């Protein structure tokens, strides 16, 4: 029986496992394998330092045959690399050992020599200390205040003009609620106006082609057991996501959604139900069919928050912002970032990278630079802006029904 290793006694756990790029048809199965505790500890064991199968097995305290089966799967799918390590050890800011890998010399490996396979994990794992999280919170909160001071007033003024001029002809807002419109439109602007158009190109050079045809980077964060001075739930998000509905000829629309602490929607790709948007479009165009099928479809829309029955009446209202324009049309109505934000963003990036980059092993530091480039567009900044706007009263608390569809829009072209 194997003696328990360090990760067997106190195993690490991943959270927020997600791909950046395109996922292939097997992503659900891959995500399932990445969610297993054994898989996560194998990946982490070979993250800071390349390891042999026997070294990984010793760290975890399991049989080598179990480790080899998992490692072979991950190596085949591009989540681990067979690599040779240099004999020069280094330490990162967490005082964890890792090695550089400049050549393919196996001769120094204990008990090995040429022909010993050594594996290095090739996913982007964030493993910050409490001190790093606290300092990061201060940095992002300070820049959120700058955004609220220097950009949000311009944005709010523009949105008021848009609301007044297009409400009856181009924009449908549930119950004409200006606060609900501001919540969704401000979030949309933060997600889309702050985007670095070159960031995807920078990240794409790190993409790995998977066996199922997907090309992506996979990221994960280590769960921690320390108490922070702030509520991390406020900053949890699920994807700034825009997608079209098929078939396009029958459903000429695009959906934008962004999940945050402030909505009641479930995260995860599996919880994005396209049928609901198709049925809502059919409802708006009076093509749900005849009874009793029509009533069943309407009840589905009510159950999922797309339709809300008015109190004391028999009528429903659509519980989602609907734009009779393209997403780009609406984006072009919003004010651009002021020129001064170029320097602000550069300063922001420097502070973030000076803090984050030393926390990653050498083979992930280039990706770290590109991942945190244009920090002003990250979820960490956007969610803190929303937090401050709510605290300052610029945004008002949402109702139970509004939490079902806030930060979600349907664009009908």
Image: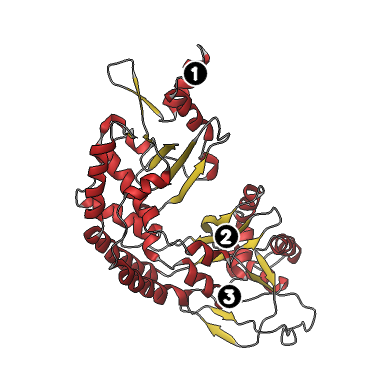
**Outermost top residue:** 291
Q: CA gap, disc 2 to disc 3?
A: 14 Å
> Element type at marker 2?
strand
**What label does residue 296 carry, if any?**
1
Q: Which corner quadrant holds the N terminus?
A: bottom right
* Residue 221 vertical placement versus 159 (above, below): below
- 242 vs 103, left or right, is left
Percent coordinates x, y for residue 77 in the rendering:
69, 60
Residue 218: which disc? 2
The first of marks 2 and 3 along the sequence is: 2
Which circle's residue, 2 or 1, is located before the other in the chain? 2
Residue 328 percent across, percent down from the top left: 41, 47
Q: Residue at x 19, y 52 (%)?
A: 392
Q: Is residue 15 left or right of residue 316?
A: right
Q: Which residue is mark 3?
A: 363
Image quadrant of residue 13? Answer: bottom right
Residue toward you, 124 or 217: 217
């Amino acid at each position: 029986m194997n003696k328990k290793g360090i990760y067997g006694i106190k195993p690490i756990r991943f959270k927020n496992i997600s791909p950046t790029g395109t996922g292939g048809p097997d992503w659900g199965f891959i995500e399932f394998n990445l969610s297993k505790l054994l898989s996560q500890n194998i990946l982490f064991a070979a993250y800071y330092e390349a390891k042999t199968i026997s070294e990984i097995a010793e760290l975890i305290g399991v049989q080598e045959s179990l480790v080899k089966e998992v490692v072979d799967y991950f190596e085949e799918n591009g989540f681990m690399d067979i690599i040779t390590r240099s004999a020069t050890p280094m330490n990162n800011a967490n005082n964890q050992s890792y090695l550089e890998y400049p050549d393919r010399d196996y001769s120094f490996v204990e008990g090995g020599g040429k022909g010993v396979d050594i594996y290095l994990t090739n996913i982007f794992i964030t493993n910050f200390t409490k001190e790093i999280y606290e300092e990061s919170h201060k940095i992002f909160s300070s820049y959120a205040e700058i955004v609220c001071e220097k950009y949000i007033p311009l944005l709010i003024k523009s949105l008021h003009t848009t609301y007044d001029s297009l409400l009856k002809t181009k924009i449908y807002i549930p119950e004409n609620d200006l606060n609900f419109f501001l919540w969704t439109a401000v979030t949309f602007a933060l997600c889309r106006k702050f985007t670095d158009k070159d960031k995807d190109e920078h990240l794409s050079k790190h993409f790995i082609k998977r066996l199922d045809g997907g090309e992506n980077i996979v990221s994960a964060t280590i769960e921690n057991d320390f108490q922070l001075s702030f509520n991390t739930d406020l900053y949890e998000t699920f994807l700034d996501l825009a997608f079209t509905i098929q078939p396009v000829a029958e459903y000429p629309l695009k959906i934008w959604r962004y999940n945050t602490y402030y909505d009641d929607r479930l995260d995860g790709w599996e919880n994005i139900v396209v049928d609901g948007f198709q049925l809502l479009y059919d409802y708006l165009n009076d093509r749900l069919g005849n009874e009793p099928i029509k009533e069943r479809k309407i009840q589905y829309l009510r159950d999922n928050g797309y339709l809300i029955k008015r109190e004391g009446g028999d009528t429903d209202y659509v519980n989602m912002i609907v734009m009779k324009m393209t997403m780009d049309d609406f984006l072009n109505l919003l004010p651009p970032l002021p020129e001064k934000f170029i320097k602000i963003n550069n300063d922001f990036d420097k502070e973030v990278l000076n803090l984050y980059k030393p926390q990653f092993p050498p083979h992930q530091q280039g990706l770290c630079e590109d991942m945190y480039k244009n920090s002003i567009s990250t979820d960490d900044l956007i969610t803190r802006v929303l937090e401050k706007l709510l605290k300052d009263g610029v945004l008002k608390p949402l109702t139970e029904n509004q939490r079902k569809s806030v930060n979600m829009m349907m664009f009908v072209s």
